[in-house]
Image (cartoon, helix red, strand yellow):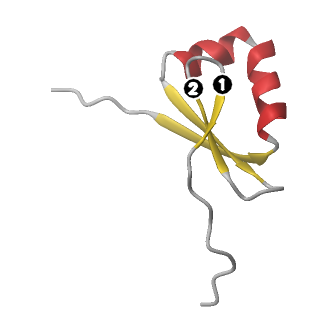
Amino acid sequence: MTLPTWLNFVVEAIPAQINAIVQRHRALQKVFDHQWAHLVVLDFCSSEFCLYEPTGQMNLLGYRPLGNCNL
């Protein structure tokens, strides 16, 4: 039995800019639209995570880091 393996990309940038790049490159669209890979963008302005959806939209994941971690 073969288990599927997905590649996850996490990019720190402005989600709209990353979405525009994906929309300009058909090969990237196919990879993410067919969910062979997943794209998550960490908005460095708001510290919110957005997930690229097969519809071509960036959707907020509803998770925000709590802040600095003092270890």
Tag 2, which secondary structure?
loop
Label 2 environment density (alpha carbons within 10 Å; few <14, some 14–19, many ≥20): some
Q: Nearer the viewer, residue 43 or 30?
A: 43
Give the quadrant of residue 69.
bottom right
Q: Nearer the viewer, residue 55 or 8?
A: 55
Rendered-image quadrant of the C terminus: bottom right
- Give the alpha-carbon distance from disc 2 to disc 1, as whole Å: 5 Å
Q: Nearer the viewer, residue 39 or 49?
A: 49
Is residue 36 depicted above or below 9 in this figure? above
The type of residue carrying mark 1 is Gln
The type of residue carrying mark 2 is Glu
Name the residue furthest bottom. Answer: 71
Give the number of the disc on residue 57.
Answer: 1
Name the residue furthest left. Answer: 1
Q: Position of residue 6 (x, y in %)?
A: 43, 33
Q: Position of residue 11 (x, y in %)?
A: 71, 45
- Residue receiving disc 2: 53
Label 1 environment density (alpha carbons within 10 Å; few <14, some 14–19, many ≥20): some
Is residue 60 depicted above or below 45 in this figure? above
Asked whether the residues under the numbered discs 2 and 1 touch, taking CB atoms below 8 Å apart as contact, a structural biologist would say: yes
**Would you say 1 lies left or right of 8 here?**
left
Q: Residue at x 56, y 46 (%)?
A: 61
Give the number of the disc on residue 43.
Answer: none
Give the quadrant of residue 19.
top right
Rendered-image quadrant of the N terminus: top left
Tag 1, which secondary structure?
loop
Is residue 43 depicted above or below 8 in this figure? below
